Amino acid sequence: MHEDAYGKAFDRVLFARILQYVRPYRLQVGLALFFLLLTTLTAAATPLFFKWAIDGALVPKEAKPLAERFALLLWVSLGFLLVRFVNFAATYGQTYLIQWVGQRVLFDLRSALFAKLMRLHPGYYDRNPVGRLMTRVTSDVDAINQFITGGLVGVIADFFTIFGLLAFMLALSPKLTLVVLLVVPVLLWVTAWVRNGMRAAYREMRLRLARLNAALQENLSGVETIQLFVKEKEREARFDRMSQDLLKAWVEIVRWFALFFPVVGFLGDFAVASLLFYGGSEVVRGAASLGLLVAFVDYTRQLFQPLQDLSDKFNLFQGAMASAERIFGVLDAEEELKDPEDPKPILRFRGEVAFKDVWLAYTPKGVEPSEKDWVLKGVSFRIAPGEKVALVGATGAGKTSVVSLIARFYDPQRGRVLIDGEDVRNYRQEDLRRHVG
């Protein structure tokens, strides 16, 4: 399994496969999107209450009795509270449902991965460090969860918010809306620039994290050997270098984050300043009301928040695509040892074991072993039922390989392994190992 970081920000095939795990919960997702629409509408309607309060009661264009102004303020306040309560309820429903779906998908993916790992033959683990596989079941699955709960739904929420706010703003004043939108091209350019930098930084961070996890697992599983050969200092120095590389990668990510958010915040403040100048001039000339200007300032601040969040959502997409590729790489791994279509039933073994010209090399399937790759070369023997045989030899001579072939943890490249005169490949693996055990 390669550990190279994924370079594409979005992959339709991987995205479709992720959605397959979401599909069983489409009812909950649909209800969450309905709550999301309610949240957007209530948030977009909130500044209107400021406009109505200012233009109708606080600074009315025409003189009104105090009682009428107080009554209007009361109704505006009650309406504001009602809208905010609906916003609160919709936000709660949306957040709960999306997090619930995310946790269910996380559970399904983790279970599918573990079940797959249990079916893969030992040769797969010879080629893939356990630490890296643990990252697939933990960190990579969690990245998919974040993508669903924060990335996918977050992008939909941001677009709902942007288009909802723009619709309200255009309905109130196309001129003031145009003033605000003049900053957007600059914002999009800055976002694209920072996005490219952050994508490279995240790619490098995930690559170094995978290496660090693999090294950690290797050192912990072999700690007795390390201590036996007095290699602690050497291993500590190597781990520190890898940890330092990971630290540098994270610092680069932080640098891009630290740059992006102040820049977007300043552009938002520039839009507000432009709005105050132009909109204030309109208020002074009597072409616009003070309430309209106050509402637009609030709309502008709301508008730049989702625009700022979109870049962060992009990073979730990037991380999710990389994690999805690695996860589906495991799920799609070929199960090299397959059961026969018509397996032989096992009632009871007599216990006769025979090897006939068996050749074994621990090379990937489809790779022709070289002379130095062979662990067993032309091995032939027969063990009668009830006979006791000791396998003696130096480390690496093939003792464990012989036992592994009997239990069919591996298949030989040449020759046959027989139990009671039947090739072990004719049995179901589960039945064979149950009787061998």
Image (cartoon, rainbow, N blue to C red):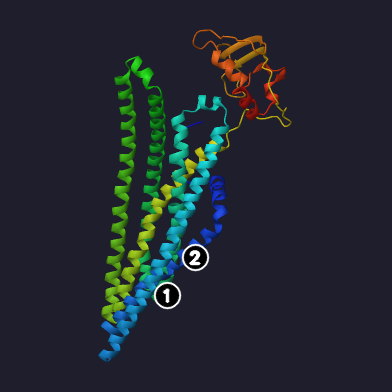
Image position, residue 34 (x, y; %): 49, 65
Image position, residue 321 (x, y; %): 48, 44
Image position, residue 245 (x, y; %): 33, 32
Residue displayed at 45% across by 68% down: 38
Describe the element under mark 1 as helix, strand or loop.
helix
Image position, residue 72 (x, y; %): 32, 85
**N-term-proximal mark, 1 vs 2:** 2
Where is 437 relative to 358, above or below? below
Residue 340 visible to an observer of this rendering = yes
Q: Amino acid at mark 2?
A: Phe
Split into 4 quadrants, where in the image is the C terminus?
A: top right
Residue displayed at 42% across by 75% down: 171
Residue displayed at 30% across by 49% down: 259
Describe the element under mark 2 as helix, strand or loop.
helix
Q: Is residue 254 left or right of residue 341?
A: left
Mark 2 = which residue?
34
Q: Nearer the viewer, mark 1 or mark 2?
A: 2
Q: Residues within 10 Å of mark 1 (few under 14, many from 20)?
A: few
Where is 343 relative to 251, above or below? above
Where is 133 relative to 21, above or below? above
Quarter of the rendering containing residue 198: top left
Mark 1 = which residue?
171
Q: Is residue 411 left or right of residue 4?
A: right
Q: Amino acid at mark 1?
A: Ala
Residue 10 visible to an observer of this rendering = no
Quarter of the rendering containing residue 281: bottom left
